[in-house]
Image (tube, coloured by chain):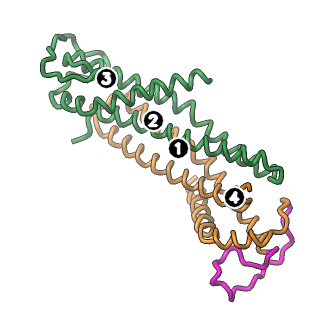
Chain colours: A green, B orange
Amino acid sequence: MPPSKLYIKTKALERLLKEEDYYKKELQDQQKLVNTLKDDKSVDPYELKKHIEVLQDTERLFPSLYQKIDEFKVDLENYLKEFSKDSGVSSVQNESSESAPNTNTEAPTANGHGSLSPIDKVEIETLQPLIDELLQKATLAVKNFNSLH
Amino acid sequence: MPPSKLYIKTKALERLLKEEDYYKKELQDQQKLVNTLKDDKSVDPYELKKHIEVLQDTERLFPSLYQKIDEFKVDLENYLKEFSKDSGVSSVQNESSESAPNTNTEAPTANGHGSLSPIDKVEIETLQPLIDELLQKATLAVKNFNSLH
């Protein structure tokens, strides 16, 4: 069986946020090295230049990374909204949802996701803590990046 | 005491090769996901498109990465050549090379590294296995990349 849409969307966002961690660490290490080299008068200008280029290569990764994080976050949020409409289960808060009534009888939204099966309800409850964490982290990451650029 | 030039050059190449490992793994994972999505007829074209864009973002990292790996490799090799000239110690082969003659008598290169102190000799012997491994890996990586592009 192929992985579910929800699983793919969640893991995609998780992966981008792991990339962000990795790139940020890289940037930090390289910035530190460049600072050390700048302070050392015996360092070749050529060598310093090359290390600054490595730093710039890393810096260049961020705009498209944050754009992707934002897009994948919005896509996951939209999918969860649909789910909560289809099932009556709140997708943002955790719930012992046995008593949650299914009050929503709207038609599916236009982007082609149909009603979700009971399997998805179990899945969303399992993934919910991870999803909450990822959405929060993604929102903060994009906000921080936009406020600096 | 600031880190030595040799240490910085070695660690810089090591770091780029670790980045290469990370990016290659990312590329592989993302390619696999894109293939899975392509095979699944129920996947939104929008979602597939977004995942192909993530793949392309990763692919775009490689040309400048391999260029940097090549530059840092050549810089480290040149530095080692100078060291072997200054000290009479073979820098490319391991130290069981007592019988290996030092045949390199070329003039120093133009990039301004002076004679190395006895401390550097100890350091180079410590770093030699790592350096050999990195130079070999870098040579292979650049060669593979160039043969494909």
Q: Amino acid at mark 1?
A: Glu
Q: Which mark is residue A111?
A: none
- On whether residue A126 falls in the magenta region, the answer is no
C-alpha span from label 1 to label 3 = 28 Å
**For residue A93, side relative to residue A69 (left or right):** left
Which amino acid type is shown beneath numbered disc 3? Answer: Tyr
**Residue at mark 1:** B59
Q: Give yes or no for contact between labels 1 and 2 (Cβ–Cβ under 8 Å).
A: no
The reply to whether callout 2 and callout 4 are in contact (CB within 8 Å) is no
- Residue B127 position, x and y percent, is 64, 68
Q: Nearer the viewer, mark 1 or mark 4?
A: 4
Q: Chain of mark 2?
A: A
The residue shown at (43%, 49%) is B28
Q: From which residue to which does the magenta span run?
A: B85-110
Callouts 3 and 2 close, C-beta under 8 Å: no
Chain of the residue under label 1 = B
At label 2, counting other C-alpha atoms closer than 10 Å, the crowd grade (few under 14, some 14-19, many 20 or more) is many
Q: Which residue is mark 4?
A: B9
The quarter of the displayed image where residue A91 is located: top left
Q: What residue would you read off at disc 3?
A: A79
Amino acid at circle 4: Lys
Whole-percent x and y of residue A137?
A: 44, 29
Compared to residue A52, the image places residue A13 above or below, namely: above
Q: CA distance from mark 3 to mark 4?
A: 48 Å
Specify whether disc 3 shares its chain with disc 2: yes
Any mark on residue A17, and which? 2
Q: Is residue A47 left or right of residue B137?
A: right
Q: Are marks 1 and 4 on the same chain?
A: yes
